[in-house]
Structures are given as structure tokens and as C-alpha cells.
Amino acid sequence: MNAFNKCLVALTASIGLASCGGGGGSGSHGAFEPPNSGTLTLTATSRQLPVNSGDVIPFNGSPYQVEVDITWRRSNGDLVQGTLPANVAINPVTVAAFSTLDDPSTPDVNETTVLLGSGPVNITGGHGTVFINSRRTAGTATLSVTATDTGSPASAGSVSATMTFTVINATPPLPATIAFSATPTGIYTQETGGRTSSALSAVVRDGGGQLVPDPVAGNTAVNNVKFEIVGNSTYGTLTAVTASGAGNSGTSVLTRTVRGVGGAAFSSGSVQGPIQIRVTVDRADNNVDNGISDPLTSTTTITVSDGKLAKLSISNPIVDAIVQGRVLTDVVPASGTPVVFPANGFYQLTVAAKGTDTQGNPVPANTVIRFGAIDAPLSGFPDFGSGNFDISGSDGNPAEGLTLFTAPTGHFTTAGGGTNLGDTLLVFGNLVPGNDDLESARTVSTINSGTSLNVSVPFNRNDATGNIVNSGNVLPYVIGRARDASVFATGTNRDGVILGVTDENGVASAVLTYPLNKLGKGMYLYAQGDGASNGTFIKKVTAIQGMAFAGIAPAKLTSSPEDIPGNGTSAVHVCIIDALGAPLQGIFVDFAFTNLGAGGTGSVDGVASSGTVAAPTGGDGCTIASVTTSGLGTVTGGTATNKPQVVFSAIGLSDFTTITAGGSRSLTASPSAVRGSGATITLTLRDAAGNPVAGVLINAVCTGDVTTVPGGGPGVTNAQGVTTARIDDTGGLNGFGESGSGECKFTAASGETATVTFTGVDQCNADLSPPDPRCSTSGGTTQTLTVNVSRNGPSTCGLTVTSNPTGIICSIPSGAAAATLTCTAPFAQGANVGLNAQKVGASPTCDITAGNAPVVQFSGGCVPLSAGNASTNLTGPQTCNVIVN
């Protein structure tokens, strides 16, 4: 393809056209010298084309395509020699477009099928060819060609020519189809706080797919569209503008199309449910003012509801929503230099609940949703998985419309240490048909006995049928409290989302916080909001979801040692950690043997061939699998892909340990991979039968960002064939804006080796919340937080404002006169900075939490959270004002 054609922009026939190149200019031969220009002649095989309503792609012989020859001659009549470009354009492109001859140098593109609005076309030996292709719209399009002769001065000059083409619609301009829609399709009854109207649109086309013309009778505009509510006036009201410009409203309105589009508005009435709207046009004359003799109709449905919360559903937590929090164990010294602290603390997970009303519409924005969690009393974690709630059962019976709850087999006063006042009772009504209304989260207010208690808010009436339904003692329940989990659903989170209230989609969010040393522990999350009221009773709508404290992806599963001897029993450590090295607890690990060969057998914890390791992962994220094999061959041949192996897998992760069939000694290291810190490595030397080998010295050589701790081993194996080595970080393993790695190779005096790898963590890639200021010193972006602290006289209280993370310490002392102080500090881009204000002065007068005057007020870029606390999100520079009056 030549340079000019290569700049043409390809488009599909149904999308649009692009321009490449420009128009030609006129020759310049002096003010009194006539231009010595030639001529351009356009010759077409036809100047009429049918409408291409199906967007048929151009092809040779297409009925929607005509060929145009461009002839370029100089003023003396000679054809222009050589190859020169001409600038070609056509408009409007909604009516027609052009394409060019196929270029054999571009076998992957057929230029004949590429539609253009403008661009250069080569004229060779005085002739060029373009193809005019009709499009979906009938009308007239003008082809323009301009060329400039760049030859000798005697022949230089610009020439141009135009030709019109008519794209003809083969059908009369009368209605044939209606595309009818409503936006939105779900609205609310009046006084709900939600949207109460919907915009109606009817696109009317004729049989050729053309928009019908604007309707007229003589020189007077007429109406050609009729909108109707299929029902009475209680269903709602339609409004529209007539052809005369007057407004009309009611259950039926008339209007006209403009460029084929007619519109109206529907406003809800007092009736809930699906409301049908019908639109009618007249195929006979495109006029409904004079009656409708040949009706063409279309209907659409708008769902009207009261916006009252009827159902809640909790979204599944997603790994991407987890961010790392921190627990500061030290303060910042007076020098301002941050104290280095370990990457420990808690994780935060954004959870969400969607609320809908009885008709399935999302509840209006700003509907309040309350969130909560329970994770205790719970036993069996991590020894038996995620744990089981101690105060639970399957024979719960909430008293419909009352506060009493009973369970014949309940142990409310003894199980798990007994129920406490203020505990949360969760009732799983959704699990028993006919009891959805009894899905409940209630606060325990009175404990009557081991099988009876009362709650602070009555249970729902479970009367969706019109009568109360009491199924008896059949509902599963759990009683507990939050010990490790907390749910924050007030204010604004780090992404600027207002927590605890629904958005325009009916979705409310909250932030779940839990310690990283309890990953895998079971819990229940619940969400609750107020539903419909019968005047005296407000229905509570509840959703409950069981889950486990989640880690940060990607997690990693490792099995060590990498090799164990065959025809014996060996212990294999299987560990699961998350992306930051936190252990995932209570996870059951599956196993399977491969490539054992004829006569070979294998078992783990006494289970043959495949199954599950007996114990789940413990507090360190590890479990020990006792692997036994027999009947393996005496040779160690084979490739890495067909050696005997035991494969361990869990939560989509896997690793394997190779079984040495020949029977040589093996040195194993556990764990074989460490992420995020140093560790104590257990080294075990075994003989060919898997028996421990004592009295052998193990040496260690570490490279990278790790080193052995002086006096921390390894040493000589004991009677169990074991010695340990303490490995520490040299300072470069974990960092802010960077991370390191290391490796330790252990070698027995008898020659056996084992290797342990260490992978560091870049804390700035962990999506910290709040972001650590040290991330910014490693090349990250910072934003400045300015805090203006003021005391208005004659207050006797001073004020001290501090930030979390540390950076702002702004304090004015108590006194009678007004005073102001401004403090600034840089924080990482996007940091969610908390501010805490403490009044300085005599107690209780200057005690914020006691609610005494004078008060502290936050303003500017701060969002007040509670007495003396606020937060701000540093997506850019921010200023917060804190005043004590």
C-alpha cells in the first residue's frame, strides 16, 4: 500500500466513517495571469442507489455500489502522467461513503470493502477509480474531488469536480416498525424518596428502515404517536407535548415525532407492580389526529414499587477488596523519624449488601443498612477447620411479632460460657421453606433459662400470606458476639464511598476488620434494614452470610521436604500462607499419589491412594502429613515428570513432594520456602528406610538478604535426626518501595543437601490502609494535609489534634484569648488519614467524650466520625479545620 492509502482509516459499514487527507488548493499564477489549470471529469455507472438498510459490506457487483471514474487532464487536453494524489470526500456520510481499488501490496486488507468519508486516491496516467456505497439513510450525497498538478509551472494548478448521488428508499414513508423503550424501567410510588417518573421513547421507521418524516397535513404539523396507560388513572399519568406545542396529560396523550422519535413521560400513581404502556401509530397516513385506521402498536413495561426494603443479599467478599491495616507498637520520636515496626496488625475487607423492594427494584439511595458480625464463642478452630459456634442449634422458635425465642435443646446459659446480655441472635429463616420473614438478627435483652430468652426488638410476623405462620421449633440459630471481627459502616471509606447507606443501585457497603493471625476462622456477617410498616410494626429485613477471615491473594502452598525416601514413612509439612506471609488456618489439605509404578502403594495418615490429610492447617498455617509408601522399585531412574510423587492441594493451590525410590539418605528442611521474614528452619536427616540419622553435622551457607543467627545453629543432628537453624533478615528482605530475597543451602557432612528460599515483601505493593508514609520516600506520590486548629475565646479549653498514621501533632494550650495554629505533613497519595482531637484543660469541662461544652467541630475536608474523631482521604491536597468553642 502506498503512503497515501496507508493513512486511510478503516471502518465497518455500520459504525461510521473517518477522514484521512485534506482538500486541494487552487493554483497561483499572479494577480493578472489566469490559472493554467486542467480539468477533472467524473463518470459514474449510475447516480442512484437503493438504501442499504442491512449494512451489506461492499463487494464487486453489489447493488449498493456504483463505480466512478476520475479523469484528470491538463489544460492542453493531455492526461496527467505519472501517479499523483487527488483528495476525495463525500458527505453526508450517513447517506453514502466511498471505497478504493484493492491494493495488492496489502493482502490482509481489501480496500474495496473499507468505507471512507475522505482521503487521498491515486490518479495514475490521468485515471483513478472510487466506489460509491449507499448506507442506511435515504437522501442525496455529494462527491467532491480536488487535485493539484505539481508538474512544470506551465501546467501547475488546482482542479476540482463534484457529483451528486441519490440514495432511494424503495418503500413509502409510512410507519412500519416501532422501537419502544422506557428509561428507567423501575420507578417508585410518590413520597418514597426515589425516582417517580420514566422517560418514554418511540422510534418510528418505515419499511425501508428510514425514520418517518416529521408529520404534517398541508403546512400544519400533526400528531402521529399515541401513548396510553393500559389501566386506569390510579396506575399513573402520562405527559407529552402536542404538535401545536401545547402540553397534554392523562392516561392517554398525543404527540409527534421529530426525526422519527416521539417521546412522553410516565409518572407513577398509587398502584404497585408492572404497568404496561402502549404506543400506537397509524400505518395508513402517519397521522393520529384524524383517527387511526391501520394501527401499529408496541408495549413496554415499567415496574412501580414502594421502595420499601423487602430483601437483602450480601455479596461474596472478593480478594481484591482486602487491604492491610497496621497496629503501631511504638510512637514516633521527637526527631520525627518513623520507628520501624513489623508488618503485623489486621486486614480490612469491603463487604456489600444489596437491597430490593417487593417488586425487585433497588431501594432508593441513602436507605440505611446496618452491618454486624459474630465470631465467638467458637470452638474447634483451627484444629477442626474454621470452627463451630458453641451456642447454636436447629430447633429455634422465634415468637412471631413478639420478643420471645425458645429452643427445646438449647444451652443458652452453659454452652461456650453462656449467652451474654447484648449478644446477637441470628435466626436462619431462609433455610426452612415458608419462614423467610424470620431471617433475623436480634440483640439479646433477657436470658430466661437455658432454652428461653428475649430480644430487644420483636421478630417479624411471618405473615406474607395474610396470616401468621408458625412452623414451630424448626429454625437453625446461632448466638454470639464479635471478638476478633469488627464492622465499620459509618462515614466514608478510603475510596470515598459513604458506608452504611445504599447508593443508586441499592448497594450499601461496610468495612470488616479482623486480625491477620486468625485467617481462616469462621464468622457470620449480617446486614439489616427497616422494611415496610403497618403503622405500629416495622419489619426488619435481614441477610446473613457465613464466611471465614480471608487472606490476601495470591496465597501459596508449599510441601517440604522436596524429596522423601520411598518404602517407608516420612513426615511432610504442608503450609499455606497468603501474599504477605500470614498463615491460613483451619484449611483441610487433599493429597494424591502419582507414578508409583506397578506394585507401588502409598498412604497419608493411613488413607490409601488419595484423600485428605487428617489435620487441617494450624496456627502456623501448616499441617503434617505422615506419608507411607511400599513396593517401590530399587532404581531412581525416570524423568522429573514421571518420578513417584505425592501431590498436596487446597483452595486451588498445589505442590508436590518427590519420593526417592532407590533408598538413599535425604536431608529435608521445613519450611522449604519463607515469605516476608526470617524463620527457624527444622532440618531432618533420614536414611534410606526413613529412619533418623543422628550425630551428623549440618552446615549452612546463606546468600542474599538473609543470614544465620550467631549461635542459632544448625548443628549436629540429635537422636531424631533433627537440628535447627535460626535465619534472620539482614535488613533488605522487606521494604517500602522495594523488596529482597535470599537463599540458605544446608549441607550434611555426609553430602546430602536441602535449600530454603526467602522472598521479601514490598509493603507499598500491599495496598496498605492507611498507606505508610515511608512508601512516598521510595518514589511514591505524596499529598499534603493541612490542619488548622483554632480556639475561640473566651474558651478555657485548649486543643490537640493528632493523625493516624502519625504525621500531624498540632496543639494550642488552654487560655482565654482566641488562638490559631496551622500544621502540615505529607502522606502517601490516597491515604485515609484519621484525626483525633483532645481538649486540653480541666476535667470534666474539657472532656470530649463526656459531651461537655465547649464542643469540638470539624469542617473543610474532614468527615466527622464520632466525638473528637474525623477522617479525610488524600486523593489530593486537603485542608481540615478543627475548632474548639
Image (spheres, rainbow, N blue to C red):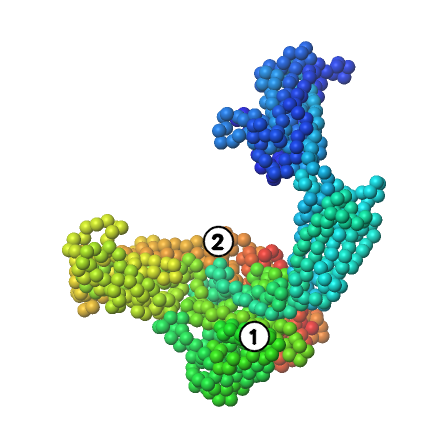
Query: Which element is circle 1 on?
Result: helix
Between disc 2 and disc 1, whose residue precedes?
Answer: 1
Q: Residue at x 46, y 81 (%)?
A: 395
Number of on-image labels? 2
Q: Where is mark 2, residue-wise? A: 778
Please determine whether, in this image, residue 63 is positioned above or below residue 425: above
Could one spot residue 159 in this view of the protein? yes
Query: Which element is circle 2 on?
Result: helix
Could one spot residue 836 in this view of the protein? no
Please determine whether, in this image, residue 766 is positioned above or below residue 453: above
Q: Picture quarter containing residue 440?
A: bottom right
Mark 1 and mark 2 in contact (Cβ < 8 Å)?
A: no
User: Which one is in front, 675 or 551?
Assistant: 551
Task: Name the mark nearer the viewer: 2 or 1.
Answer: 1
Label 1: few (<14), some (14–19) or many (≥20) C-alpha neighbours in 10 Å: many
Left or right: 156, with 426 as reference point? right
Left or right: 213, with 419 as reference point? right
Q: Residue at x 39, y 65 (%)?
A: 584
Q: Where is mark 1, residue-wise? A: 437
User: Which one is in front, 305 or 160?
Assistant: 305
User: Which one is in front, 143 or 171?
Assistant: 171
Name the outermost residue toward the bottom: 449
Q: Position of residue 703 (x, y in %)?
A: 31, 54
Q: Position of residue 268 (x, y in %)?
A: 72, 63
Q: Residue at x 64, y 32 (%)?
A: 134
Left or right: 412, with 692 as reference point? right
Please determine whether, in this image, residue 130 is positioned above or below residue 251: above
Please, what is the three-letter code of the amino acid marked with disc 2? Ser
Please, what is the three-letter code of the amino acid marked with disc 1? Asp
